[in-house]
């Protein structure tokens, strides 16, 4: 029986190629991070992607590699006909540091085909991988179920507070790794003896933590105040000198450190009361202390 030429050609075609595709094309993606942990804001994490195609990757047809936290698009290079390598970086943000970890979601999309004598159109495959990089000595924190409501009103006094006093909020322990203060002063009066600090955004959760505020190396008495708990009001001893070195610690770990020059401080003299044993003591007029509500919107006088 005579076999048609077209049938023989088709047989040879399929014999050498294995068909349009053999159905076994796979794509493998592995991701590593260096360093494997981070310690500070601004630190860079390098992600390396190893991409392997079975039986080969069609580099000429195109490929796409993404990372949802990368500072820029990953840079890729060809390792062999079946392997490519890519890298990208991520800079640790304040949010990453406060959270204690950063999650990277990588996606690779390439054209993979069978490695035969006759090449056919590759198959478009997608693979994903998730990598988590933790802060050094990471301790998982429980999900908070109760948000503390602090409604204490600051008491302005010229009498310096006792050193070593702490703010203790008895609630379940919550990991805090972010600044407490915004790093500036909203109101200051050396005569009345108080200084107000805006708190950082977002407002830190101090649940179950011991907060200490330190002026020039000495602990001072402070109260969280304001209708939305956004101001930390502290007693300012009368012998305070400027510039004022301000620091805070949470559970003995320093989270704030900055300097304040005292330029905006007023020097209001506290009103003295009449001595009841001295009828000749004049009663001075009571002059209300002016308050800048734009600078200190959470002052009780506003």
Image (tube, rainbow, N blue to C red):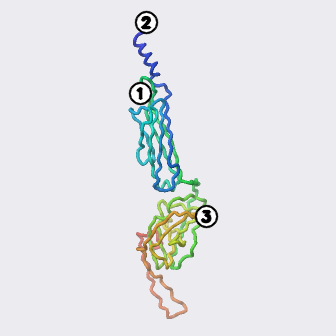
Depth check, mark 2 against mark 3: the one in front is 2
Q: Quadrant of the N terminus?
A: top left
Q: Is residue 209 above or below residue 244?
A: above
Secondary structure state at the residue bearing disc 2:
loop
Q: Residue furthest bottom?
A: 280
Q: Residue furthest top?
A: 1
Q: Is residue 126 above or below residue 213?
A: above
Check disc 1 and report the residue beneath it: 121
Q: Are marks 2 and 3 in contact (CB under 8 Å)?
A: no
Q: Quadrant of the C terminus?
A: bottom left
Mark 3: few/some/many CA within 10 Å (<14, 14-19, 20+): few
| Residue 228 percent coordinates (x, y) | 49, 64
Q: Residue furthest left?
A: 60
Secondary structure state at the residue bearing disc 3:
loop
Check disc 2 and report the residue beneath it: 2
Q: Is residue 247 above or below residue 93?
A: below
| Residue 294 percent coordinates (x, y) | 40, 69
The span from disc 2 to disc 3 (Cα, nearest Å) is: 95 Å
Mark 1: few/some/many CA within 10 Å (<14, 14-19, 20+): few
Q: Earlier in the sequence, mark 3 or mark 1?
A: 1
Q: Earlier in the sequence, mark 2 or mark 3?
A: 2
Q: What residue lies at 41% left-to-right and 47% top-to-bottom?
A: 72
Mark 2: few/some/many CA within 10 Å (<14, 14-19, 20+): few
Q: Are marks 2 and 1 in contact (CB under 8 Å)?
A: no
The span from disc 3 to disc 1 (Cα, nearest Å) is: 66 Å
The image quarter containing residue 211 is bottom right
Check disc 3 and report the residue beneath it: 170
């Amino acid at each position: 029986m005579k076999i048609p030429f077209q049938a023989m050609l088709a047989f040879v075609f399929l014999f050498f190629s294995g068909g349009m595709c053999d159905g076994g094309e796979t794509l493998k993606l592995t991701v590593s991070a260096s360093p494997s942990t981070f310690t500070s804001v601004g630190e860079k994490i390098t992600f390396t992607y190893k991409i392997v195609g079975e039986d080969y990757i069609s580099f000429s047809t195109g490929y796409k590699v993404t990372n949802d936290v990368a500072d820029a698009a990953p840079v890729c290079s060809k390792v062999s006909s079946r392997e490519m390598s890519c890298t990208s970086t991520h800079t640790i943000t304040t949010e990453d540091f406060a959270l204690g970890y950063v999650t990277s979601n990588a996606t690779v999309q390439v054209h993979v085909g069978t490695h035969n004598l006759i090449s056919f159109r590759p198959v478009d495959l997608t693979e994903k991988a998730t990598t988590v990089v933790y802060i050094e000595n990471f301790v998982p924190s429980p999900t908070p179920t109760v948000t503390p409501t602090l409604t204490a009103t600051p008491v302005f006094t010229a009498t310096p507070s006792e050193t070593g006093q702490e703010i203790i909020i008895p609630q379940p322990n919550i990991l805090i790794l972010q600044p407490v203060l915004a790093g500036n002063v909203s109101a200051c009066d050396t005569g009345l003896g108080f200084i107000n600090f805006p708190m950082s955004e977002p407002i830190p959760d101090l649940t179950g933590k011991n907060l200490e505020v330190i002026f020039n190396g000495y602990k001072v008495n402070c109260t969280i105040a304001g209708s939305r708990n956004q101001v930390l009001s502290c007693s300012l001893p009368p012998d305070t000198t400027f510039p004022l070195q301000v620091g805070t610690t949470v559970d003995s770990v320093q989270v704030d450190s900055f300097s304040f020059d005292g330029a905006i401080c007023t020097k209001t003299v506290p009103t003295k009361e009449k001595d009841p044993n001295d009828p000749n003591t004049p009663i001075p007029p009571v002059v209300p202390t002016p308050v800048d509500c734009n600078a200190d919107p959470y002052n009780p006088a506003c």
